[in-house]
Structures are given as structure tokens and as C-alpha cells.
Amino acid sequence: MAMQSRLALALTTLLLFTILTNAASADTDPPTWDEAREGVAGGAIGGLGLELPVDATNASIEMDVASFPQVIEVYTATWCTNCVQTEKILHQVIGQSNVVVINYHKFKFEPEDPFGSNGTDDRWESIYGGTSTTVGLSPRLAPTTVFDGERLHLGTRPKSSSISSDYNQSISVGSSHPFSGNASLSFSRSSESTSNSLDFSWNVENVFHDCVSDCQSYTLTPWLMYVEQVASFPEGSNGKGNYSNILVDTIQLPSLQGEISLTIPEAWDGDDISAILVIDWETSTPETTSDKAVPAIGPSLLICLLAILVPRRNNHMPL
């Protein structure tokens, strides 16, 4: 009887220790961001850019996936004073890192901010609106910063010791994409082109998941983004005056490879529009036996073992 009690105590201690250890490890170092794409395993890569001066005739760029810059998307507005603070911190964190920053400006139902378009707000809402609504009760909130299309930071309240620390962690993590290969973007001005139109070619078919077994299925969606380098708007009530990396408009391209003739949006001022190729990616992994969680096995096993070890009474009446 004493041996059974000691064995039961030892097993109980071991199982409780295992359960508590697993719970503690799950709570260690919580993320300093929110998952940007609600219910989706994916992000944004690419960032290949071409300047589009009015006198340009042609240009091209090809880049390996390993050399892609980090894509950082920001939702902002010319009246947003907190955006000035977060933008300053972001640029300090970026330093000399290889990044492309794309600033979405609030457009829909917007009385002050003159930048952006329905297309830019539509893209933001369709991709990041779910998480933004869950976290902040609205699909478009300034300031919001998204790293790699994966990690969303809303507002100015940090999740760690500071916003700078939050951003540093996000930029250090990098993209979780599983891809190799290369992508390309080019444009030309044909004799049939008007003064504000160009013929674009793109190819992201060579971006692929380099795996041997248990390969994830994936989808790629290329976008062409028109970005103005700098625009002056002294009427902006946040006092910035000059606004940079403005997303003027964006177009979802119809295929992984192709050609299309597009009208280039006018710059607010100057001649500094660029075309940037961004690739949204999404993966899904078939469920395997090893992926299935079994959180209740510890307590269940404990109960069974204790039931076995508890001594049984002899219910037979003496003869």
C-alpha cells in the first residue's frame, strides 16, 4: 500500500510539472505585434521599384528573392500628429536596412488629406482591415505600421518597453516566406503610348517554394503600386509639410506573368512617381498527425493512473 501511494505521488508530481512547464513556455516572450492578416498565413514580399520620369522610354529590374527589400506598409494621414512620432521612430529603427516603405494615406470620407485613392484604401481594408477592426474597432486607423505584410502595430501604445523596441523586434524577425527564385518588372513606351501611359511587363512565376516533401500549397498575388517620393502639402494639420513615399494608387495584376498598358497617375508635384512590384503570398499546410494537438492527454492519463493505483476494497462478505 505504501509503495502504491509513493508511486502515485511521483507520477502526479511528474505530470503536473510537465503541464506547468508547457504552460509557462507558451507564455514566454509574448509577441510585440498583432498578426496582420487575420486567419491567413501569408505576407508581402517584393519591393522591386522603377522610377517613371515623364521622359523615360524603358527600364527593367530583376531580383532574386533572397535580395528582396523588406516591405513596410504604413497607414497615415496629413492630420495625424501621432503619425509624425511613429514615422520618426520607424526611420530611426530602419537605419541602413534594405527596406521599402509605402505610406497609405486615408482617402475615403477624408476632408483634409489629398493623397491616396479608393484603390489604396480598398487594398488596406481587404488585407489588414480584419485585424485592424479586431484590435482597434475600425479597418483603417492612423498610425498603423505593418512589417512584411505579417506583423501589425497599431497606434502609439507599445507592447514592450517602447515603440522603438516593438519596431526593432519586427524588423529583426523578417519575412517568414518560404520562397526562392526571382521576379522581374519592366516598362516601355511604345509609339502607340500616350504621354501618360506605359506598357508594363512583370514575371513572378519564377518565385517558388523550394521544398522536398510535405510541401505547402501557396498562392501569389502581384500588385503594381504607384508611389510618389515626396509631395509638399503645407496645409497638413500635423505640421509635416513634406510627405514621403506616398502610395498614389495600386493595381492588382491579373496573372503571375504578363503585359499590360496602364495610365500613370499624376504626381502631386514634381516628377517623382515610381512603380513598385509587391507580391502578396499565402500558404496552407495539409494537416498531419503530428500537427494535431493533444492537450488533454496529460490530465486524462493522470486520472487513469490514479484510478489504477487506488487500493480496492474487498467487498466480499466473510463466510
Image (cartoon, grey):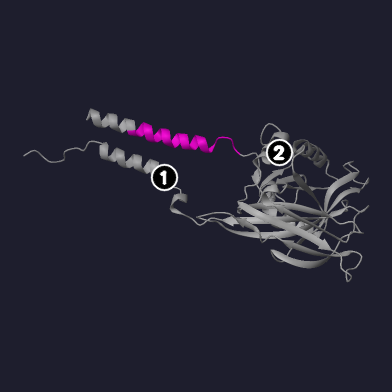
Q: Observer-nearest residue: 279 or 304?
A: 279
Q: Which quadrant of the figure contains the C terminus?
A: top left
> Which amino acid, mark 2?
Tyr
Q: Observer-nearest residue: 306 or 184?
A: 184
Look at 70% across and 48% down and name the residue there: 67
Residue 223 higher or lower than 168, as above or below? below
Q: Are marks 2 and 1 in contact (CB under 8 Å)?
A: no
Q: Quadrant of residue 116?
A: bottom right
Camera-near label (2 vs 1) is 2
Q: Is residue 73 left or right of residue 207?
A: right
Asked which secondary structure carries label 1, the reply is loop
Q: Is residue 122 among what the camera can see? A: no
Q: Residue furthest bottom?
A: 192
Look at 80% across and 40% down and name the residue there: 87
Whichever of callouts 2 and 1 sits on the residue coming sooner in the sequence is 2
| Residue 7 placement (x, y as % from top left) | 28, 31
Q: Quadrant of residue 84?
A: top right
| Residue 181 placement (x, y as % from top left) | 65, 55
Residue 12 shown in magenta: yes
Identify the mark at residue 161; answer none if there is no mark.
none
> Which amino acid, mark 1?
Ala
Asked which secondary structure carries label 2, the reply is helix
Q: What's the magenta region?
A: 11-30
Identify the mark at residue 296; answer none if there is no mark.
1
Instruction: Look at the magenta stretch and give its main secondary structure.
Output: helix
Identify the mark at residue 167; answer none if there is no mark.
2
Look at 44% across and 50% down and name the residue there: 290
Q: Is residue 269 left or right of residue 69?
A: right
Q: Which quadrant of the figure contains the N terminus?
A: top left
Residue 41 shown in magenta: no
